[in-house]
Amino acid sequence: MANNGIGESEESEHEMGAYELCIENPEKIYSELRHDCEMNIPTIHLYAFKKSEFIGMLTSQEANYGKEIAKNNLILSGGKEYFRMIDEASKNGFNG
């Protein structure tokens, strides 16, 4: 899921502080965190993915959010699990 007005602002994502969060139940956590992210200064753009979706993005041949997350290590929390997923994706063809 991607939301929170990406492309609707004149500010760049770097100026606005784009962050990603990878979890197993994105719908629940997304709704709980959305307000906090929107109220943060700079605004945090919340992206929530299931583990399987994130690993699929990393092993895909196409450019996508997952590869940007891995390229820049943009995570809000869950660093240990994040690096486990990067490792799993690396074993399945990701060379990020």
Image: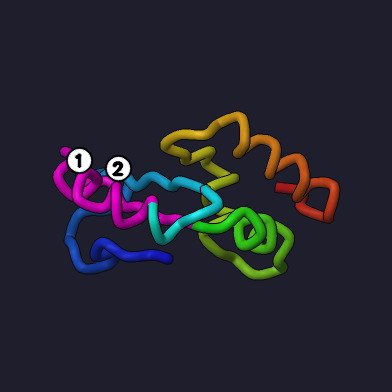
Label 2 CA crowd tier, 10 Å (few <14, some 14–19, many 20+): some
Q: Which quarter of the figure is the N terminus placed in?
A: bottom left
Task: Report the residue at 68% width, 56% height from top.
Answer: 55
- Separation (CA) of disc 2 from disc 1: 6 Å
Label 1 CA crowd tier, 10 Å (few <14, some 14–19, many 20+): some
Secondary element at image label 2 = loop
**Camera-side residue of 76 and 23:** 23
Q: Label 2 amino acid?
A: Gly
Position of 22 with respect to 27 (left or right) is right
Task: Report the residue at 31% width, 52% height from top.
Answer: 45
Q: Label 1 amino acid?
A: Pro
Residue 15 point in image, percent of width and height: 25, 44
**Marks 2 and 1: CB-CB under 8 Å?**
yes
Residue 7 point in image, percent of width and height: 27, 67
Residue 72 inside the magenta-drawn segment? no
Position of 33 with respect to 1 (left or right) is left
Residue beneath disc 2: 17
In this picture, which residue range is highlighted in magenta? 29-48
Residue 82 point in image, percent of width and height: 60, 39
Position of 56 with respect to 11 (left or right) is right
Tell me where residue 79 sits by quadrant: top right
Residue 93 point in image, percent of width and height: 83, 55
The vertical placement of 43 against 1, above or below, is above
Residue beneath disc 1: 42
Task: Report the residue at 18% width, 62% height from top.
Answer: 9
Tell me where residue 58 sits by quadrant: bottom right
